[in-house]
């Protein structure tokens, strides 16, 4: 898809007319929403939707899909205006050097002066208008940082609870190399029958049978085809009843039969090793980032809902 076709597609998409594009400038200047004292034009919608189409030659959407995309972009623009307005109300500012840096990044990504100028032309922006939009983006980012991000904390208790393991500073922790064999319960197999079969298999293992071969032949667990191999297992990765038994075993030992809602299990540990402080820290960091992101999304939604409730917003009827 050429860039000229892209612009034509976007104008048709946001105006809802596929048969003919006649007045591009008239369309882009039309006011589509009022947000307190600001307005959003069709051109604003087109410019933002252009970013969605610059990754590849997207198939032509249906009218319903086109309108759904347009509504989503317009909703995003309304929220951005509310955030910028809140930042101004709070007296926040943007360092001009940040705008310059962002502009330089865009030029570098486009790769040439010609590509940069073409981008401005197709977005129907002058460089000063682009700077204004970049300043607004940075203002929105600063406002969210102050009003939402800065108020999110993850306590050690939350982190420990999410990991489902107690927080033990200084304890390096361990992981085990293990395999698993499961005999499921069902309409044709009672718990007693499943446990009888498991005990028979355990006796064979005690006499030197290969765990992997028995798992391939008998196991009804998800890793049966791999001989029941679980790989290296860390605390918090298995069901509690399995984990309790697994981490009590020494290398080479096979567990007693373990009952769970799924059936009856056997576990074998092949090796144990300590986790380094670095590995534990990396795991905690990953978990903390996930918890932070979950809290951030929820807090941002609440904050935006409050901004919308206090604002005057009018979305114009489709023509």
Image (spheres, rainbow, N blue to C red):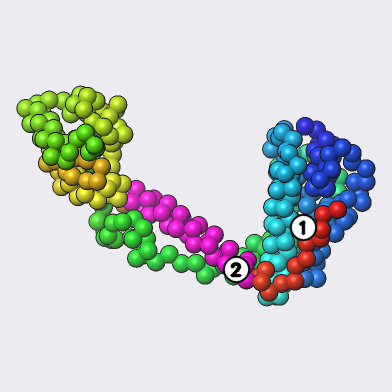
- Binning the other alpha carbons within 10 Å of mark 1 as few (below 14), some (14 to 19) or many (20 upward) gives some
Q: Position of residue 270 (x, y in %)?
A: 19, 35
Q: Quadrant of residue 220?
A: top left
Compared with 294, 266 (above or below) is: above
Question: In the image, is residue 286 part of the stretch drawn in magenta?
Answer: yes
Q: Secondary structure at mark 1?
A: helix
Which is nearer the eye, 285 or 86? 86
Image point (24%, 56%), residue name: 171
List the single residue furthest toward the front: 187
Q: Is residue 260 magenta?
A: no
Nearer to us in this view, 219 or 123: 219
Q: Is residue 256 left or right of residue 15?
A: left
Splitting the image into 4 quarters, where does residue 258 fall? top left
Q: Is residue 64 visible?
A: yes
Q: Which residue is mark 1?
A: 133
In front: 14, or 274? 14
C-alpha gap between disc 1 and disc 2: 22 Å
| Residue visible at 73% across and 64% down in the picture | 81
The picture places residue 237, in percent across and down from the top left corner, at 31, 46
Where is residue 88 drawn, in percent x and y?
72, 72
User: Dot 2 lies on which element?
Assistant: helix
Q: Residue at x 41, y 54 (%)?
A: 287
Query: Start and end of the magenta stretch?
Result: 279-306
Question: Where is the N terminus found, in terms of image quarters?
Answer: top right
| Residue pictured at 18% horizontal, 26% vertical | 214
Q: Is residue 103 left or right of residue 283?
A: right
Q: Decide: marks 1, 2 in contact (CB < 8 A)?
A: no
- Say whether disc 1 or disc 2 marks the residue closer to the N-terminus: 1
User: At which x and y percent is residue 269?
Assistant: 18, 38
Residue topped by disc 2: 303
Dominant secondary structure (helix, strand or loop) of the stretch shown in magenta: helix
């Amino acid at each position: 898809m050429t860039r000229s076709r892209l612009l034509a597609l976007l104008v048709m998409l946001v105006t809802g007319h596929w048969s003919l594009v006649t007045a591009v400038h008239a369309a882009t200047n039309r006011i589509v929403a009022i947000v307190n004292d600001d307005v959003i034009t069709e051109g604003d919608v087109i410019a933002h939707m252009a970013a969605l189409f610059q990754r590849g030659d997207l198939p032509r959407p249906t009218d319903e899909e086109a309108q759904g995309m347009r509504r989503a972009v317009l909703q995003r623009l309304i929220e951005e205006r509310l955030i910028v307005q809140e930042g101004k109300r709070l007296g926040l500012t943007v360092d001009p050097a940040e705008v310059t840096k962002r502009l330089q990044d865009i030029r570098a990504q486009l790769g040439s002066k010609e590509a940069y100028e073409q981008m401005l032309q197709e977005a129907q922006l002058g460089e000063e208008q682009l700077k204004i939009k970049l300043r607004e983006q940075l203002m929105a980012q600063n406002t969210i940082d102050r009003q939402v991000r800065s108020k999110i904390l993850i306590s050690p208790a939350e982190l420990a609870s999410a990991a489902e393991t107690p927080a033990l500073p200084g304890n390096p922790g361990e992981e085990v190399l293990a395999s698993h064999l499961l005999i499921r319960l069902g309409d044709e197999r009672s718990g007693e029958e499943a446990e009888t079969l498991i005990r028979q298999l355990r006796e064979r293992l005690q006499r030197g049978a290969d765990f992997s071969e028995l798992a391939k032949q008998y196991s009804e667990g998800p890793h049966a085809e791999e001989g029941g191999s679980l790989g290296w297992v860390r605390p918090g990765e298995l069901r509690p009843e399995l984990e309790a038994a697994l981490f009590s075993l020494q290398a080479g030992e096979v567990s007693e039969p373990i009952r769970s809602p799924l059936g009856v299990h056997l576990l074998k540990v092949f090796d144990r090793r300590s986790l380094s402080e670095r590995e534990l820290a990396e795991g905690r960091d990953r978990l903390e980032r996930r918890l932070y992101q979950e809290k951030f999304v929820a807090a941002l939604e609440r904050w935006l809902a409050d901004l919308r409730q206090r604002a005057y917003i009018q979305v114009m009827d489709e023509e």
